[in-house]
Amino acid sequence: MSTPNLDTLSINTIRTLAMDAVQQANSGHPGTPMAMAPVAYTLWQRHLRFDPNDPIWPDRDRFVLSMGHASMLLYSMLHLTGVKAVNPKYESLGELSVQLDDIKRFRQLESRCPGHPEYRWTSGIETTTGPLGQGVATSVGMAIASKWMAAHFNRPDFPMFGFDVYALAGDGCLMEGISSEAASLAGHLQLDNLAWIYDNNRITIEGHTDLAFSDDVATRFIGYGWNVTRVGDANDLSMLDRAFATFKKTTGRPTLIIVDSHIGYGAPTKQDTHAAHGEPLGVEEIKAAKRFYGWPEEAKFLVPDGVREHFAAGIGARGSKLRAEWIARFDAYKAKYPKEADALFRMQHRQLPDGWEKAIPSFPADAKGLAGRDASAKVLNAVAQSIPWLIGGSADLAPSTKTRLTFDGAGDFEAGSYAGRNFHFGVREHAMGAILNGLSLSKIRPYGSGFLIFSDYGRAPIRLAAIMEIPVIYAFTHDSIGVGEDGPTHQPVEQLLSLRAIPGLITIRPCDANEVAEAWRLTLALRHEPVALVLTRQALPTLDRTKYGPASGLAKGAYVLADAPGSAPEVLLIATGSEVALCLTAHEMLVKEGIRSRVISMPSWELFDDQPVEYQDDVMPPTVTARVAVEQATTLGWERYVGSGGRVLGMKTFGASAPLKELQKKFGFEPERVVAAAKQQLGRG
Ligand SMILES: Cc1ncc(C[n+]2csc(CCOP(=O)(O)OP(=O)(O)O)c2C)c(N)n1
Ligand SMILES: [Mg+2]
């Protein structure tokens, strides 16, 4: 091997590790790591404020690989810079997060190098990426978090927060609509701590971007209010340096660095073609590329002497010093501002202030009642005062979803005024979801709200929150045909089930104000599960809990609300949300006729499925096979609780535009229909 300088040697190590790993796995994406290695190298080695020994140090700069398919680029960086593994208790284990063996077992079961980067599985990965566009949008949430935490925690002489966020994006990320939503908001908010690096290789899976993409990207981002700079050659380290320096100097605007690169750089026949995107290069092509790099052709997974040391002397030494300074600063901060330091610690460990739950209100019985969204507003506004880092907003629907924090000092998060707790995401549900993920990954406790029907627009990031096991809260209101006159476009039918179908996401549809309060109690105490609260627009009676089962039963997903006097039930009426009161009315009618019905409130399938079978059998005795489920949503799925012989009163079509009363009649949500179904179940119809 010739003796190139350590920069080149390190960059070629990143490249060849990626090529070898993809070849060995016989699957993966070699071309982009080969092309972008100098970019990742320059950023990490010379600029990123990141300590490989403590990859969760709170004020570290964030690096997001939005083009998740190029995962080997990140794994090479994590390995070569010596990033340490951290366990779920936030303790450093001393061993490498990514061992060379993991790289050799790229894309294999249990390897720390899965196909796409996975948060929580591999330390040093800041967010799960792969669905294109999610990473860049999530990075906006991280940049917002940095600004909010700076505004909230920093004190004169104590800059506790101020990290920068870098995201690497491909053509695909910029084609996806979510990047437009996110960039638009980032520009509006003047997030000058955010840099996106665009890999302008003009290649995607099908071929040249001429096929489908002719945006003038620079002009587009200038239009969003970004600073745009260009690096004409991805291999030009000094130009890259200059671009990063420009970013750091820029105020009042995010920065886009457009980097012209050659996918598969150095591969003699595949460079600049889509053949370098998503398949191994092949043995001969790899040999030729290695020759081009001045690398030993036969060597595999080679990390030449001096490379690890070089990284240790660069990013390692810089990061370690910066982190040590921060830790010392934190100790002094703790002495001077003990309350803030305690909050900072708890927030970073996903804990809550002591006694936070004392503020949760309880609601007196009231036949007229309260809409789910209004009850939620009261609970949220009460608890938010004792959890300062509980912050969020809506996709332009706060007046309807009622998620605004209205108490003194809550304020709005706006450009230049970053301490506010009310966010305005604009009409951007998709970006909102990803931004919430970015906030949560930065340990803020975020919530976002919108109409349940539009959860479809933001579904991809909800799914990612569940995959990442981060506790994002969604308050979805206008939960059914209960919306009334707005009609079928605004009346959810299949959304509830589709949220229930996401593994790990807890969906809760409370039946009255006290269940709403219990839903927030349960949700806020969670540390690793996202929750979708599904709330009504219309008023629901606040149930008399001296007469019915206590709302605390919500925590178990389903509980007995009402039983017929005397012996065991003969028919079960199972309902969620607004249909619970309907079932209670039907229950009174059945009892009058001497039929022993039981009403079960079932706000959450997921929570109930998690209970021991004894509890489940207690609530829904297996011997009672006469069952009716009532829910203003698709009937699909309820058979698992009512059995194949049970009845489900739900929606089989889209809704319609009319006053709610008429819709209830048209779609069969009336007590008489429930009574009839119950009798039919008992063979007395
Ligand atoms: C939302 C989404 N749609 C489709 C894909 C499948 N996919 C993976 S990579 C890719 C092409 C990406 O092109 P580009 O971002 O330019 O990456 P490059 O080929 O330059 O590495 C596509 C369509 C995906 N991962 N995410
Ligand atoms: Mg591309």
Image (spheres, helix red, strand yellow):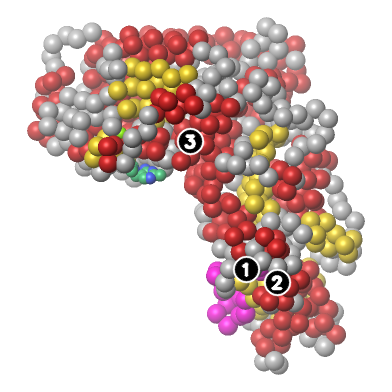
Residue 180 disc label: 3
In the rendered image, residue 133, in percent from the top left (x then y), is placed at 44, 38
At a point 31% along the width and 41% down the height, the residue shown is: 212
Q: Foreground residue, 136 or 255?
A: 255
In the rendered image, the quadrant that contains the C terminus is bottom right
Neighbour tally class for label 2: few under 14, some 14-19, many 20 plus, Cα within 10 Å: many
Q: Earlier in the sequence, mark 1 or mark 3?
A: 3
| Residue that label 1 marks | 655
| Residue that label 2 marks | 663
Pointers 1 and 2 in contact (CB under 8 A)? yes
Residue 391 disc label: none
| Amino acid type shown at disc 2 | Leu
At a point 63% along the width and 15% down the height, the residue shown is: 160
In the rendered image, residue 366, in percent from the top left (x then y), is placed at 89, 61
Judge from the rendering whether residue 655 lies leftward or rightward of residue 294; answer left or right.
right
**Residues in magenta, as a range:** 631-648
At a point 67% along the width and 92% down the height, the residue shown is: 683
Q: Is residue 390 visible?
A: yes
| Amino acid type shown at disc 1 | Gly
Q: Foreground residue, 496 or 286?
A: 496
> Which residue, as the protein is rendered here, is positioned at the far bottom?
684
Is 32 magenta? The answer is: no
Is label 3 in a helix, a strand or a loop? helix
In the rendered image, residue 447, in percent from the top left (x then y), is placed at 65, 41
